[in-house]
Image (cartoon, rainbow, N blue to C red):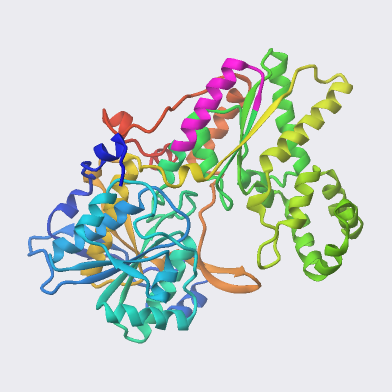
């Protein structure tokens, strides 16, 4: 394998971790817990793993280790996030410390590897090749959901064959929900297999009182912020373009908010605020256009707009339009397919309710087509494929042309659009994520040693020096509630949205009017891995504000 100079240098980096994990540890048991919502329903579904206490590890004077070796399996589930390899390295080092004869097995390409019995043993030679690197390529990842008894039983066959006593599932909210269901099932049948989860997603929406942040968020936001800063510097140099930049984050706007805090763009839309204010697409267009006009009056015909990926689903009117389209096409897809391409737009306009027909007719041709042609296996619009950045740029341009005719605007408006997504998912982890992920993995091994199941590895107090971080475990049922998914009520981990009364948003809201008019850009530059701690080891601005 060919390696870059950075890969070679990073291989020798030793992640920092909580001081408590450097010695002999014992679990401190807290109070019993309840679920985030729907307590009775969740308790009924998870009788063996509900109400378990929060665990915090403390140093112990006793001997550290296990008399017998422990075999552990690990799965990478869902989309990639920087730091996953360090979670695996932390698990490996932890179980080897407990007993040198312990073994770690990785299931290939996600949960499907467990079901299909595709795996490989992760030895020291393999682990050492991947320390402090980005990506999930050590064993690959996948999106197969562990939901059915047949899957659980099929997985148990290989777990028994390999004498695996514990399984660590590294994933987001859906993957950890599946981990909780699996833990409950194995506990109910006395399978003798523990299941531990680790919080992963660059979207940042898997967090709560015990899980401060999901790993990968810090690195991904720093990657995006570097490129946004570069664009803003170019923007301020050429002074002739408005850049519309869409960022990952379908279900929440944490990435957009963090990148705004790091780079200070002229405009950043927060989906949760749009929904709370019941804003229409027209309202958003007018707000952006007003900033363009105000800057043009000062001779500044340039700027940057940050847009969260899932914005359209938070606009009440657009959500209603999408719902009606889903319902209509589910029952009339065959007839729609027979309509000539040139007539499809008019066909849809004639079939929708008057309110939704008017909104659909106002959309640019390309976006209108995306709403009807790009659909998932369930018949729903694939919102992530909608080029929201182009939609807003085109509609703002149209609005400004109207205002120019009315004498309200006399500037110049040229746009460039961008979507930053996959660029951030497999970056070499920042020092924060390298340290945090290794600590999460090591903590997972300690939860295994303590005999726990149905827990998520938890490392808190991460705005302090790593030696002061708090390691432990949180019952996954504590994070769950019931939500409607594909027409059925199902237990799921509650997604964390941007809190409009939270410190990060309130700080942003207090600054954005100034950023809109002034050119007060910040240029973060690339992630720094070597140098003073104030440059290399800082957590996200969101986390620092939340922990103040």
In this rendering, is residue 469 above or below 178?
Answer: above
Magenta stretch: includes residue 236: yes
Left/right placement of residue 212 relative to residue 44 reads left
Rendered location of residue 311, percent (x, y): 65, 46
Rendered location of residue 163, percent (x, y): 24, 78
- State which region is magenta: 223-242
Left/right placement of residue 54 relative to residue 253 reads left
In this rendering, is residue 330 above or below 413?
Answer: below
The residue shown at (57%, 28%) is 265
Magenta stretch: includes residue 41: no
Quadrant hosting residue 463: top left
Query: Looking at the image, which residue sits at the far bottom?
Result: 189
Foreground residue, 314 or 54?
314
Foreground residue, 465 or 383?
383
Quadrant in which the C terminus is drawn: top left
Rendered location of residue 260, percent (x, y): 53, 33
Is any part of residue 47 visible from this angle? Answer: no
Q: Main secondary structure of the magenta part?
A: helix
Is any part of residue 325 visible from this angle? Answer: yes
């Amino acid at each position: 394998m060919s390696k870059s100079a950075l890969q070679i240098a990073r291989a020798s980096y030793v992640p920092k971790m909580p001081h408590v994990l450097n010695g002999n540890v014992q679990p401190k048991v807290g109070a019993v817990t309840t679920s985030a919502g729907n307590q009775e329903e969740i308790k009924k579904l998870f009788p063996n793993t509900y109400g378990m206490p929060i665990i915090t590890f403390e140093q112990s004077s006793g001997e550290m280790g296990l008399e017998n070796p422990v075999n552990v399996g690990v799965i990478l589930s869902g989309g990639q996030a920087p730091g996953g390899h360090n979670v695996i390295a932390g698990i490996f080092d932890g179980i080897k410390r407990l007993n040198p004869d312990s073994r770690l097995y990785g299931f290939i390409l996600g949960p499907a590897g467990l079901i299909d019995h595709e795996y490989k043993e992760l030895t020291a030679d393999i682990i050492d090749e991947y320390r402090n690197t980005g990506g999930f390529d050590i064993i690959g990842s996948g999106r197969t959901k562990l939901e059915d008894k047949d899957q659980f039983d099929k997985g148990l066959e290989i777990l028994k064959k390999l004498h695996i006593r514990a399984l660590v599932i590294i994933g987001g909210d859906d993957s950890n929900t599946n981990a909780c269901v699996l833990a409950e099932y194995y506990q109910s049948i006395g399978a003798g297999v523990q299941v531990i989860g680790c919080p992963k997603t660059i979207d940042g929406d898997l967090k709560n009182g015990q899980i401060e942040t999901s790993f990968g968020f810090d690195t991904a936001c720093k990657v995006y912020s570097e490129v946004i800063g570069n664009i803003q510097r170019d923007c301020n140099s050429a002074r002739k373009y408005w850049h519309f930049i869409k960022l990952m984050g379908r279900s929440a706007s944490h990435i957009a908010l963090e990148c705004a805090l790091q780079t200070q763009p002229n405009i950043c839309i927060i989906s949760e605020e749009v929904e709370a204010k019941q804003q229409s697409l027209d309202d958003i267009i007018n707000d952006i256009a007003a900033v363009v006009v105000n800057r043009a009056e000062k001779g500044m015909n340039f700027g940057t707009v940050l847009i969260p990926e899932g914005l359209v689903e938070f606009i009440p009117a657009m959500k209603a339009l999408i719902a009606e389209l889903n319902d209509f096409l589910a029952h009339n897809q065959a007839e729609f397919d027979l309509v000539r391409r040139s007539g499809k737009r008019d066909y849809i306009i004639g079939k929708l309710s008057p309110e939704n027909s008017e909104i659909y007719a106002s959309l640019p041709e390309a976006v209108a087509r995306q709403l009807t042609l790009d659909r998932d296996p369930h018949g729903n619009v694939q919102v992530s494929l909608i080029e929201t950045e182009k939609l807003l740029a085109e509609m703002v341009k149209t609005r400004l042309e109207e205002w120019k005719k009315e004498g309200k605007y006399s500037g110049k408006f040229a746009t460039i659009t961008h979507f930053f997504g996959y660029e951030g998912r497999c970056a070499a982890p920042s020092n924060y994520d390298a340290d945090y992920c290794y600590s999460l993995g090591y903590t997972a091994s300690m939860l295994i040693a303590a005999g726990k199941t149905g827990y998520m590895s938890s490392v808190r107090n991460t705005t302090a020096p790593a030696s002061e971080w708090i390691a432990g475990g949180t019952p996954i049922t504590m994070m769950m509630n019931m939500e409607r998914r594909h027409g059925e009520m199902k237990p799921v981990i509650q997604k964390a949205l941007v809190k409009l009364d939270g410190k990060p948003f309130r700080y942003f809201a207090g600054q954005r009017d100034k950023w809109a008019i002034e050119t007060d850009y910040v240029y973060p530059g690339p992630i720094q891995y070597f140098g003073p701690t104030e440059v290399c080891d800082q957590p996200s601005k969101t986390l620092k504000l939340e922990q103040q």
